[in-house]
Image: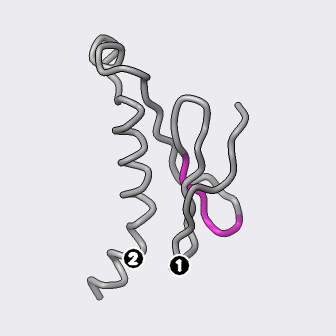
Amino acid sequence: MTDTRTITQRRFPPWQVIELQGGYAVEDAQGRRLGTFLGRATSIEATHAGALTIDEARQMAFEFARLPELLKHAE
């Protein structure tokens, strides 16, 4: 699977969202993959397969990448 480089970077720690073919991934500053969120092109395909849509996968990846910021504010 080829990926296109960073969509966004986060500050603490710098987690970034990477677009993949069919989904998104979140990586840390060292390039370690922390999570992968795959989705289907249409809601009909997603419902039939019991999967996320590509929009839902993107939203989940961005929310996951925000976790360090949210935890920092909770302290």
The residue depicted at 52 percent of the width and 42 percent of the height is 24
Q: Residues within 10 Å of mark 1 (few under 14, many from 20)?
A: few
Give the labeled residue for mark 2. Answer: 69
Q: In which quarter of the view is residue 22 placed?
A: top right
Q: Amino acid at mark 2?
A: Glu
Q: In which quarter of the view is residue 62 placed?
A: bottom left
Q: Is residue 28 magenta?
A: yes
Residue 4 lies, in percent from the top left, at 68, 44
Q: CA distance from mark 1 to mark 2?
A: 8 Å
**Quarter occupied by the C terminus:** bottom left
Q: Residue furthest bottom?
A: 75
Q: Amino acid at mark 1?
A: Arg
Q: Kindly indicate whether the residue at mark 2 contacts the one at mark 1 (C-beta within 8 angstroms).
A: yes
**Quarter occupied by the N terminus:** top right
Q: Residues within 10 Å of mark 2 (few under 14, many from 20)?
A: some
The residue depicted at 55 percent of the width and 47 percent of the height is 25
Q: 16 above or below 60?
A: below
Magenta-colored span:
25-30
Give the labeled residue for mark 1. Answer: 11
* Towards the viewer: 65 or 19: 19
**Which secondary structure lies at badge 1?**
loop
Q: 54 above or below 65?
A: above
The residue depicted at 64 percent of the width and 56 percent of the height is 6
Q: Which color scheme is applied?
A: one colour
- What's the mark number on residue 47? none
